[in-house]
Image: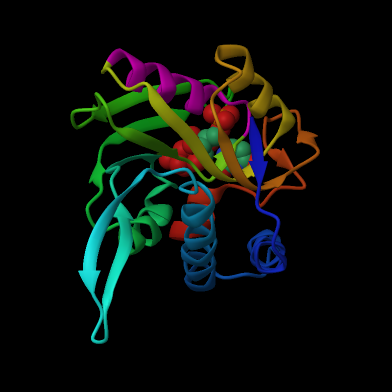
Amino acid sequence: MLHLLNHPLASHIVTHLRDKTTKPVTFRTLTYQIGLLLAVEATRDLQTCKVEIETPLENFPGTVLRDTLVLVPILRAAIGLVQPFVDLFPNVSIGYVGLERDHQTAIARNYYCKLPPLEEQRILILDPMLATGGSAVQTIQLVQESGGKNLAVVCVVAAPEGVDAIERLDPNTPIFSAALDRELNSRKYILPGVGDYGDRLYGT
Ligand code: PRP
Ligand code: URA
């Protein structure tokens, strides 16, 4: 269930993220901007409830958000995506999952996990790069073991291999991405991709 951002501004931002001459300070701003667009797209189906309010001129039958959100950013690159979601949805709870890919095998090792209560919550797993999908799949499993059911994955760039990995786990898991790239290289980096997202975000 892949949903791609279909907006010229999204393509503009991702192109600048891909550009190897983009410096970390700009890379962080672009990450914030694409995060805002992803936050809007990934929350289209949030439930609302009716409220009666008064405008300065008359009564108005309004709607406000009913669902609360839980964000689960995968450390460390997804930290760059948290602020745009928090700015649009100030009442979110945030859980953290720490995963790091082994440089030789590209298999992610879990080094941290702290999740808030997840039952009955709408959960958005954030990770800018969906490469092999190993990190996202491990996080989905951690979320499910903690009682989370209603979850989606939000990324900036997805590879077909990562999308397949999530679909093999559960074909109904929504994936929201700004771009779908061609393939992985032999070191499991996305092509054309943006390079190492965490390194580019933090200048490491
Ligand atoms: C990167 C990226 C994702 C992961 C994606 O993290 O931020 O979390 O790789 O790859 P996968 O789909 O093949 O699992 P990395 O392991 O480099 O850690 P970092 O964010 O700490 O740099
Ligand atoms: N992680 C990254 O940061 N970039 C990739 O291309 C793949 C995994």
Q: Front-most of 148 and 113? A: 148
- Could you tell me if residue 204 is visible in this image? no
State which quadrant residue 113 falls in: top left
- Could you tell me if residue 162 is visible in this image? yes
Q: Front-most of 190 and 174? A: 174
Ligand 2 shows up in which quadrant of the image?
top right
Magenta part of the chain: 131-145
For image coordinates 64% across by 66% down, the residue present is 13
Q: Which quadrant of the rendered structure holds the N terminus?
A: top right
| Residue 137 within the magenta-colored segment of the rendering | yes
Query: Compared to 191, does 106 lie above or below?
Result: above
Query: Compared to 69, does 88 lie above or below?
Result: below
Main secondary structure along the magenta-highlighted residues: helix
Does residue 58 appear left or right of residue 109 in this picture? left
Q: Front-most of 82 and 44? A: 44
Residue 180 at x, y percent in the picture: 72, 42
For image coordinates 54% across by 50% down, the residue present is 197
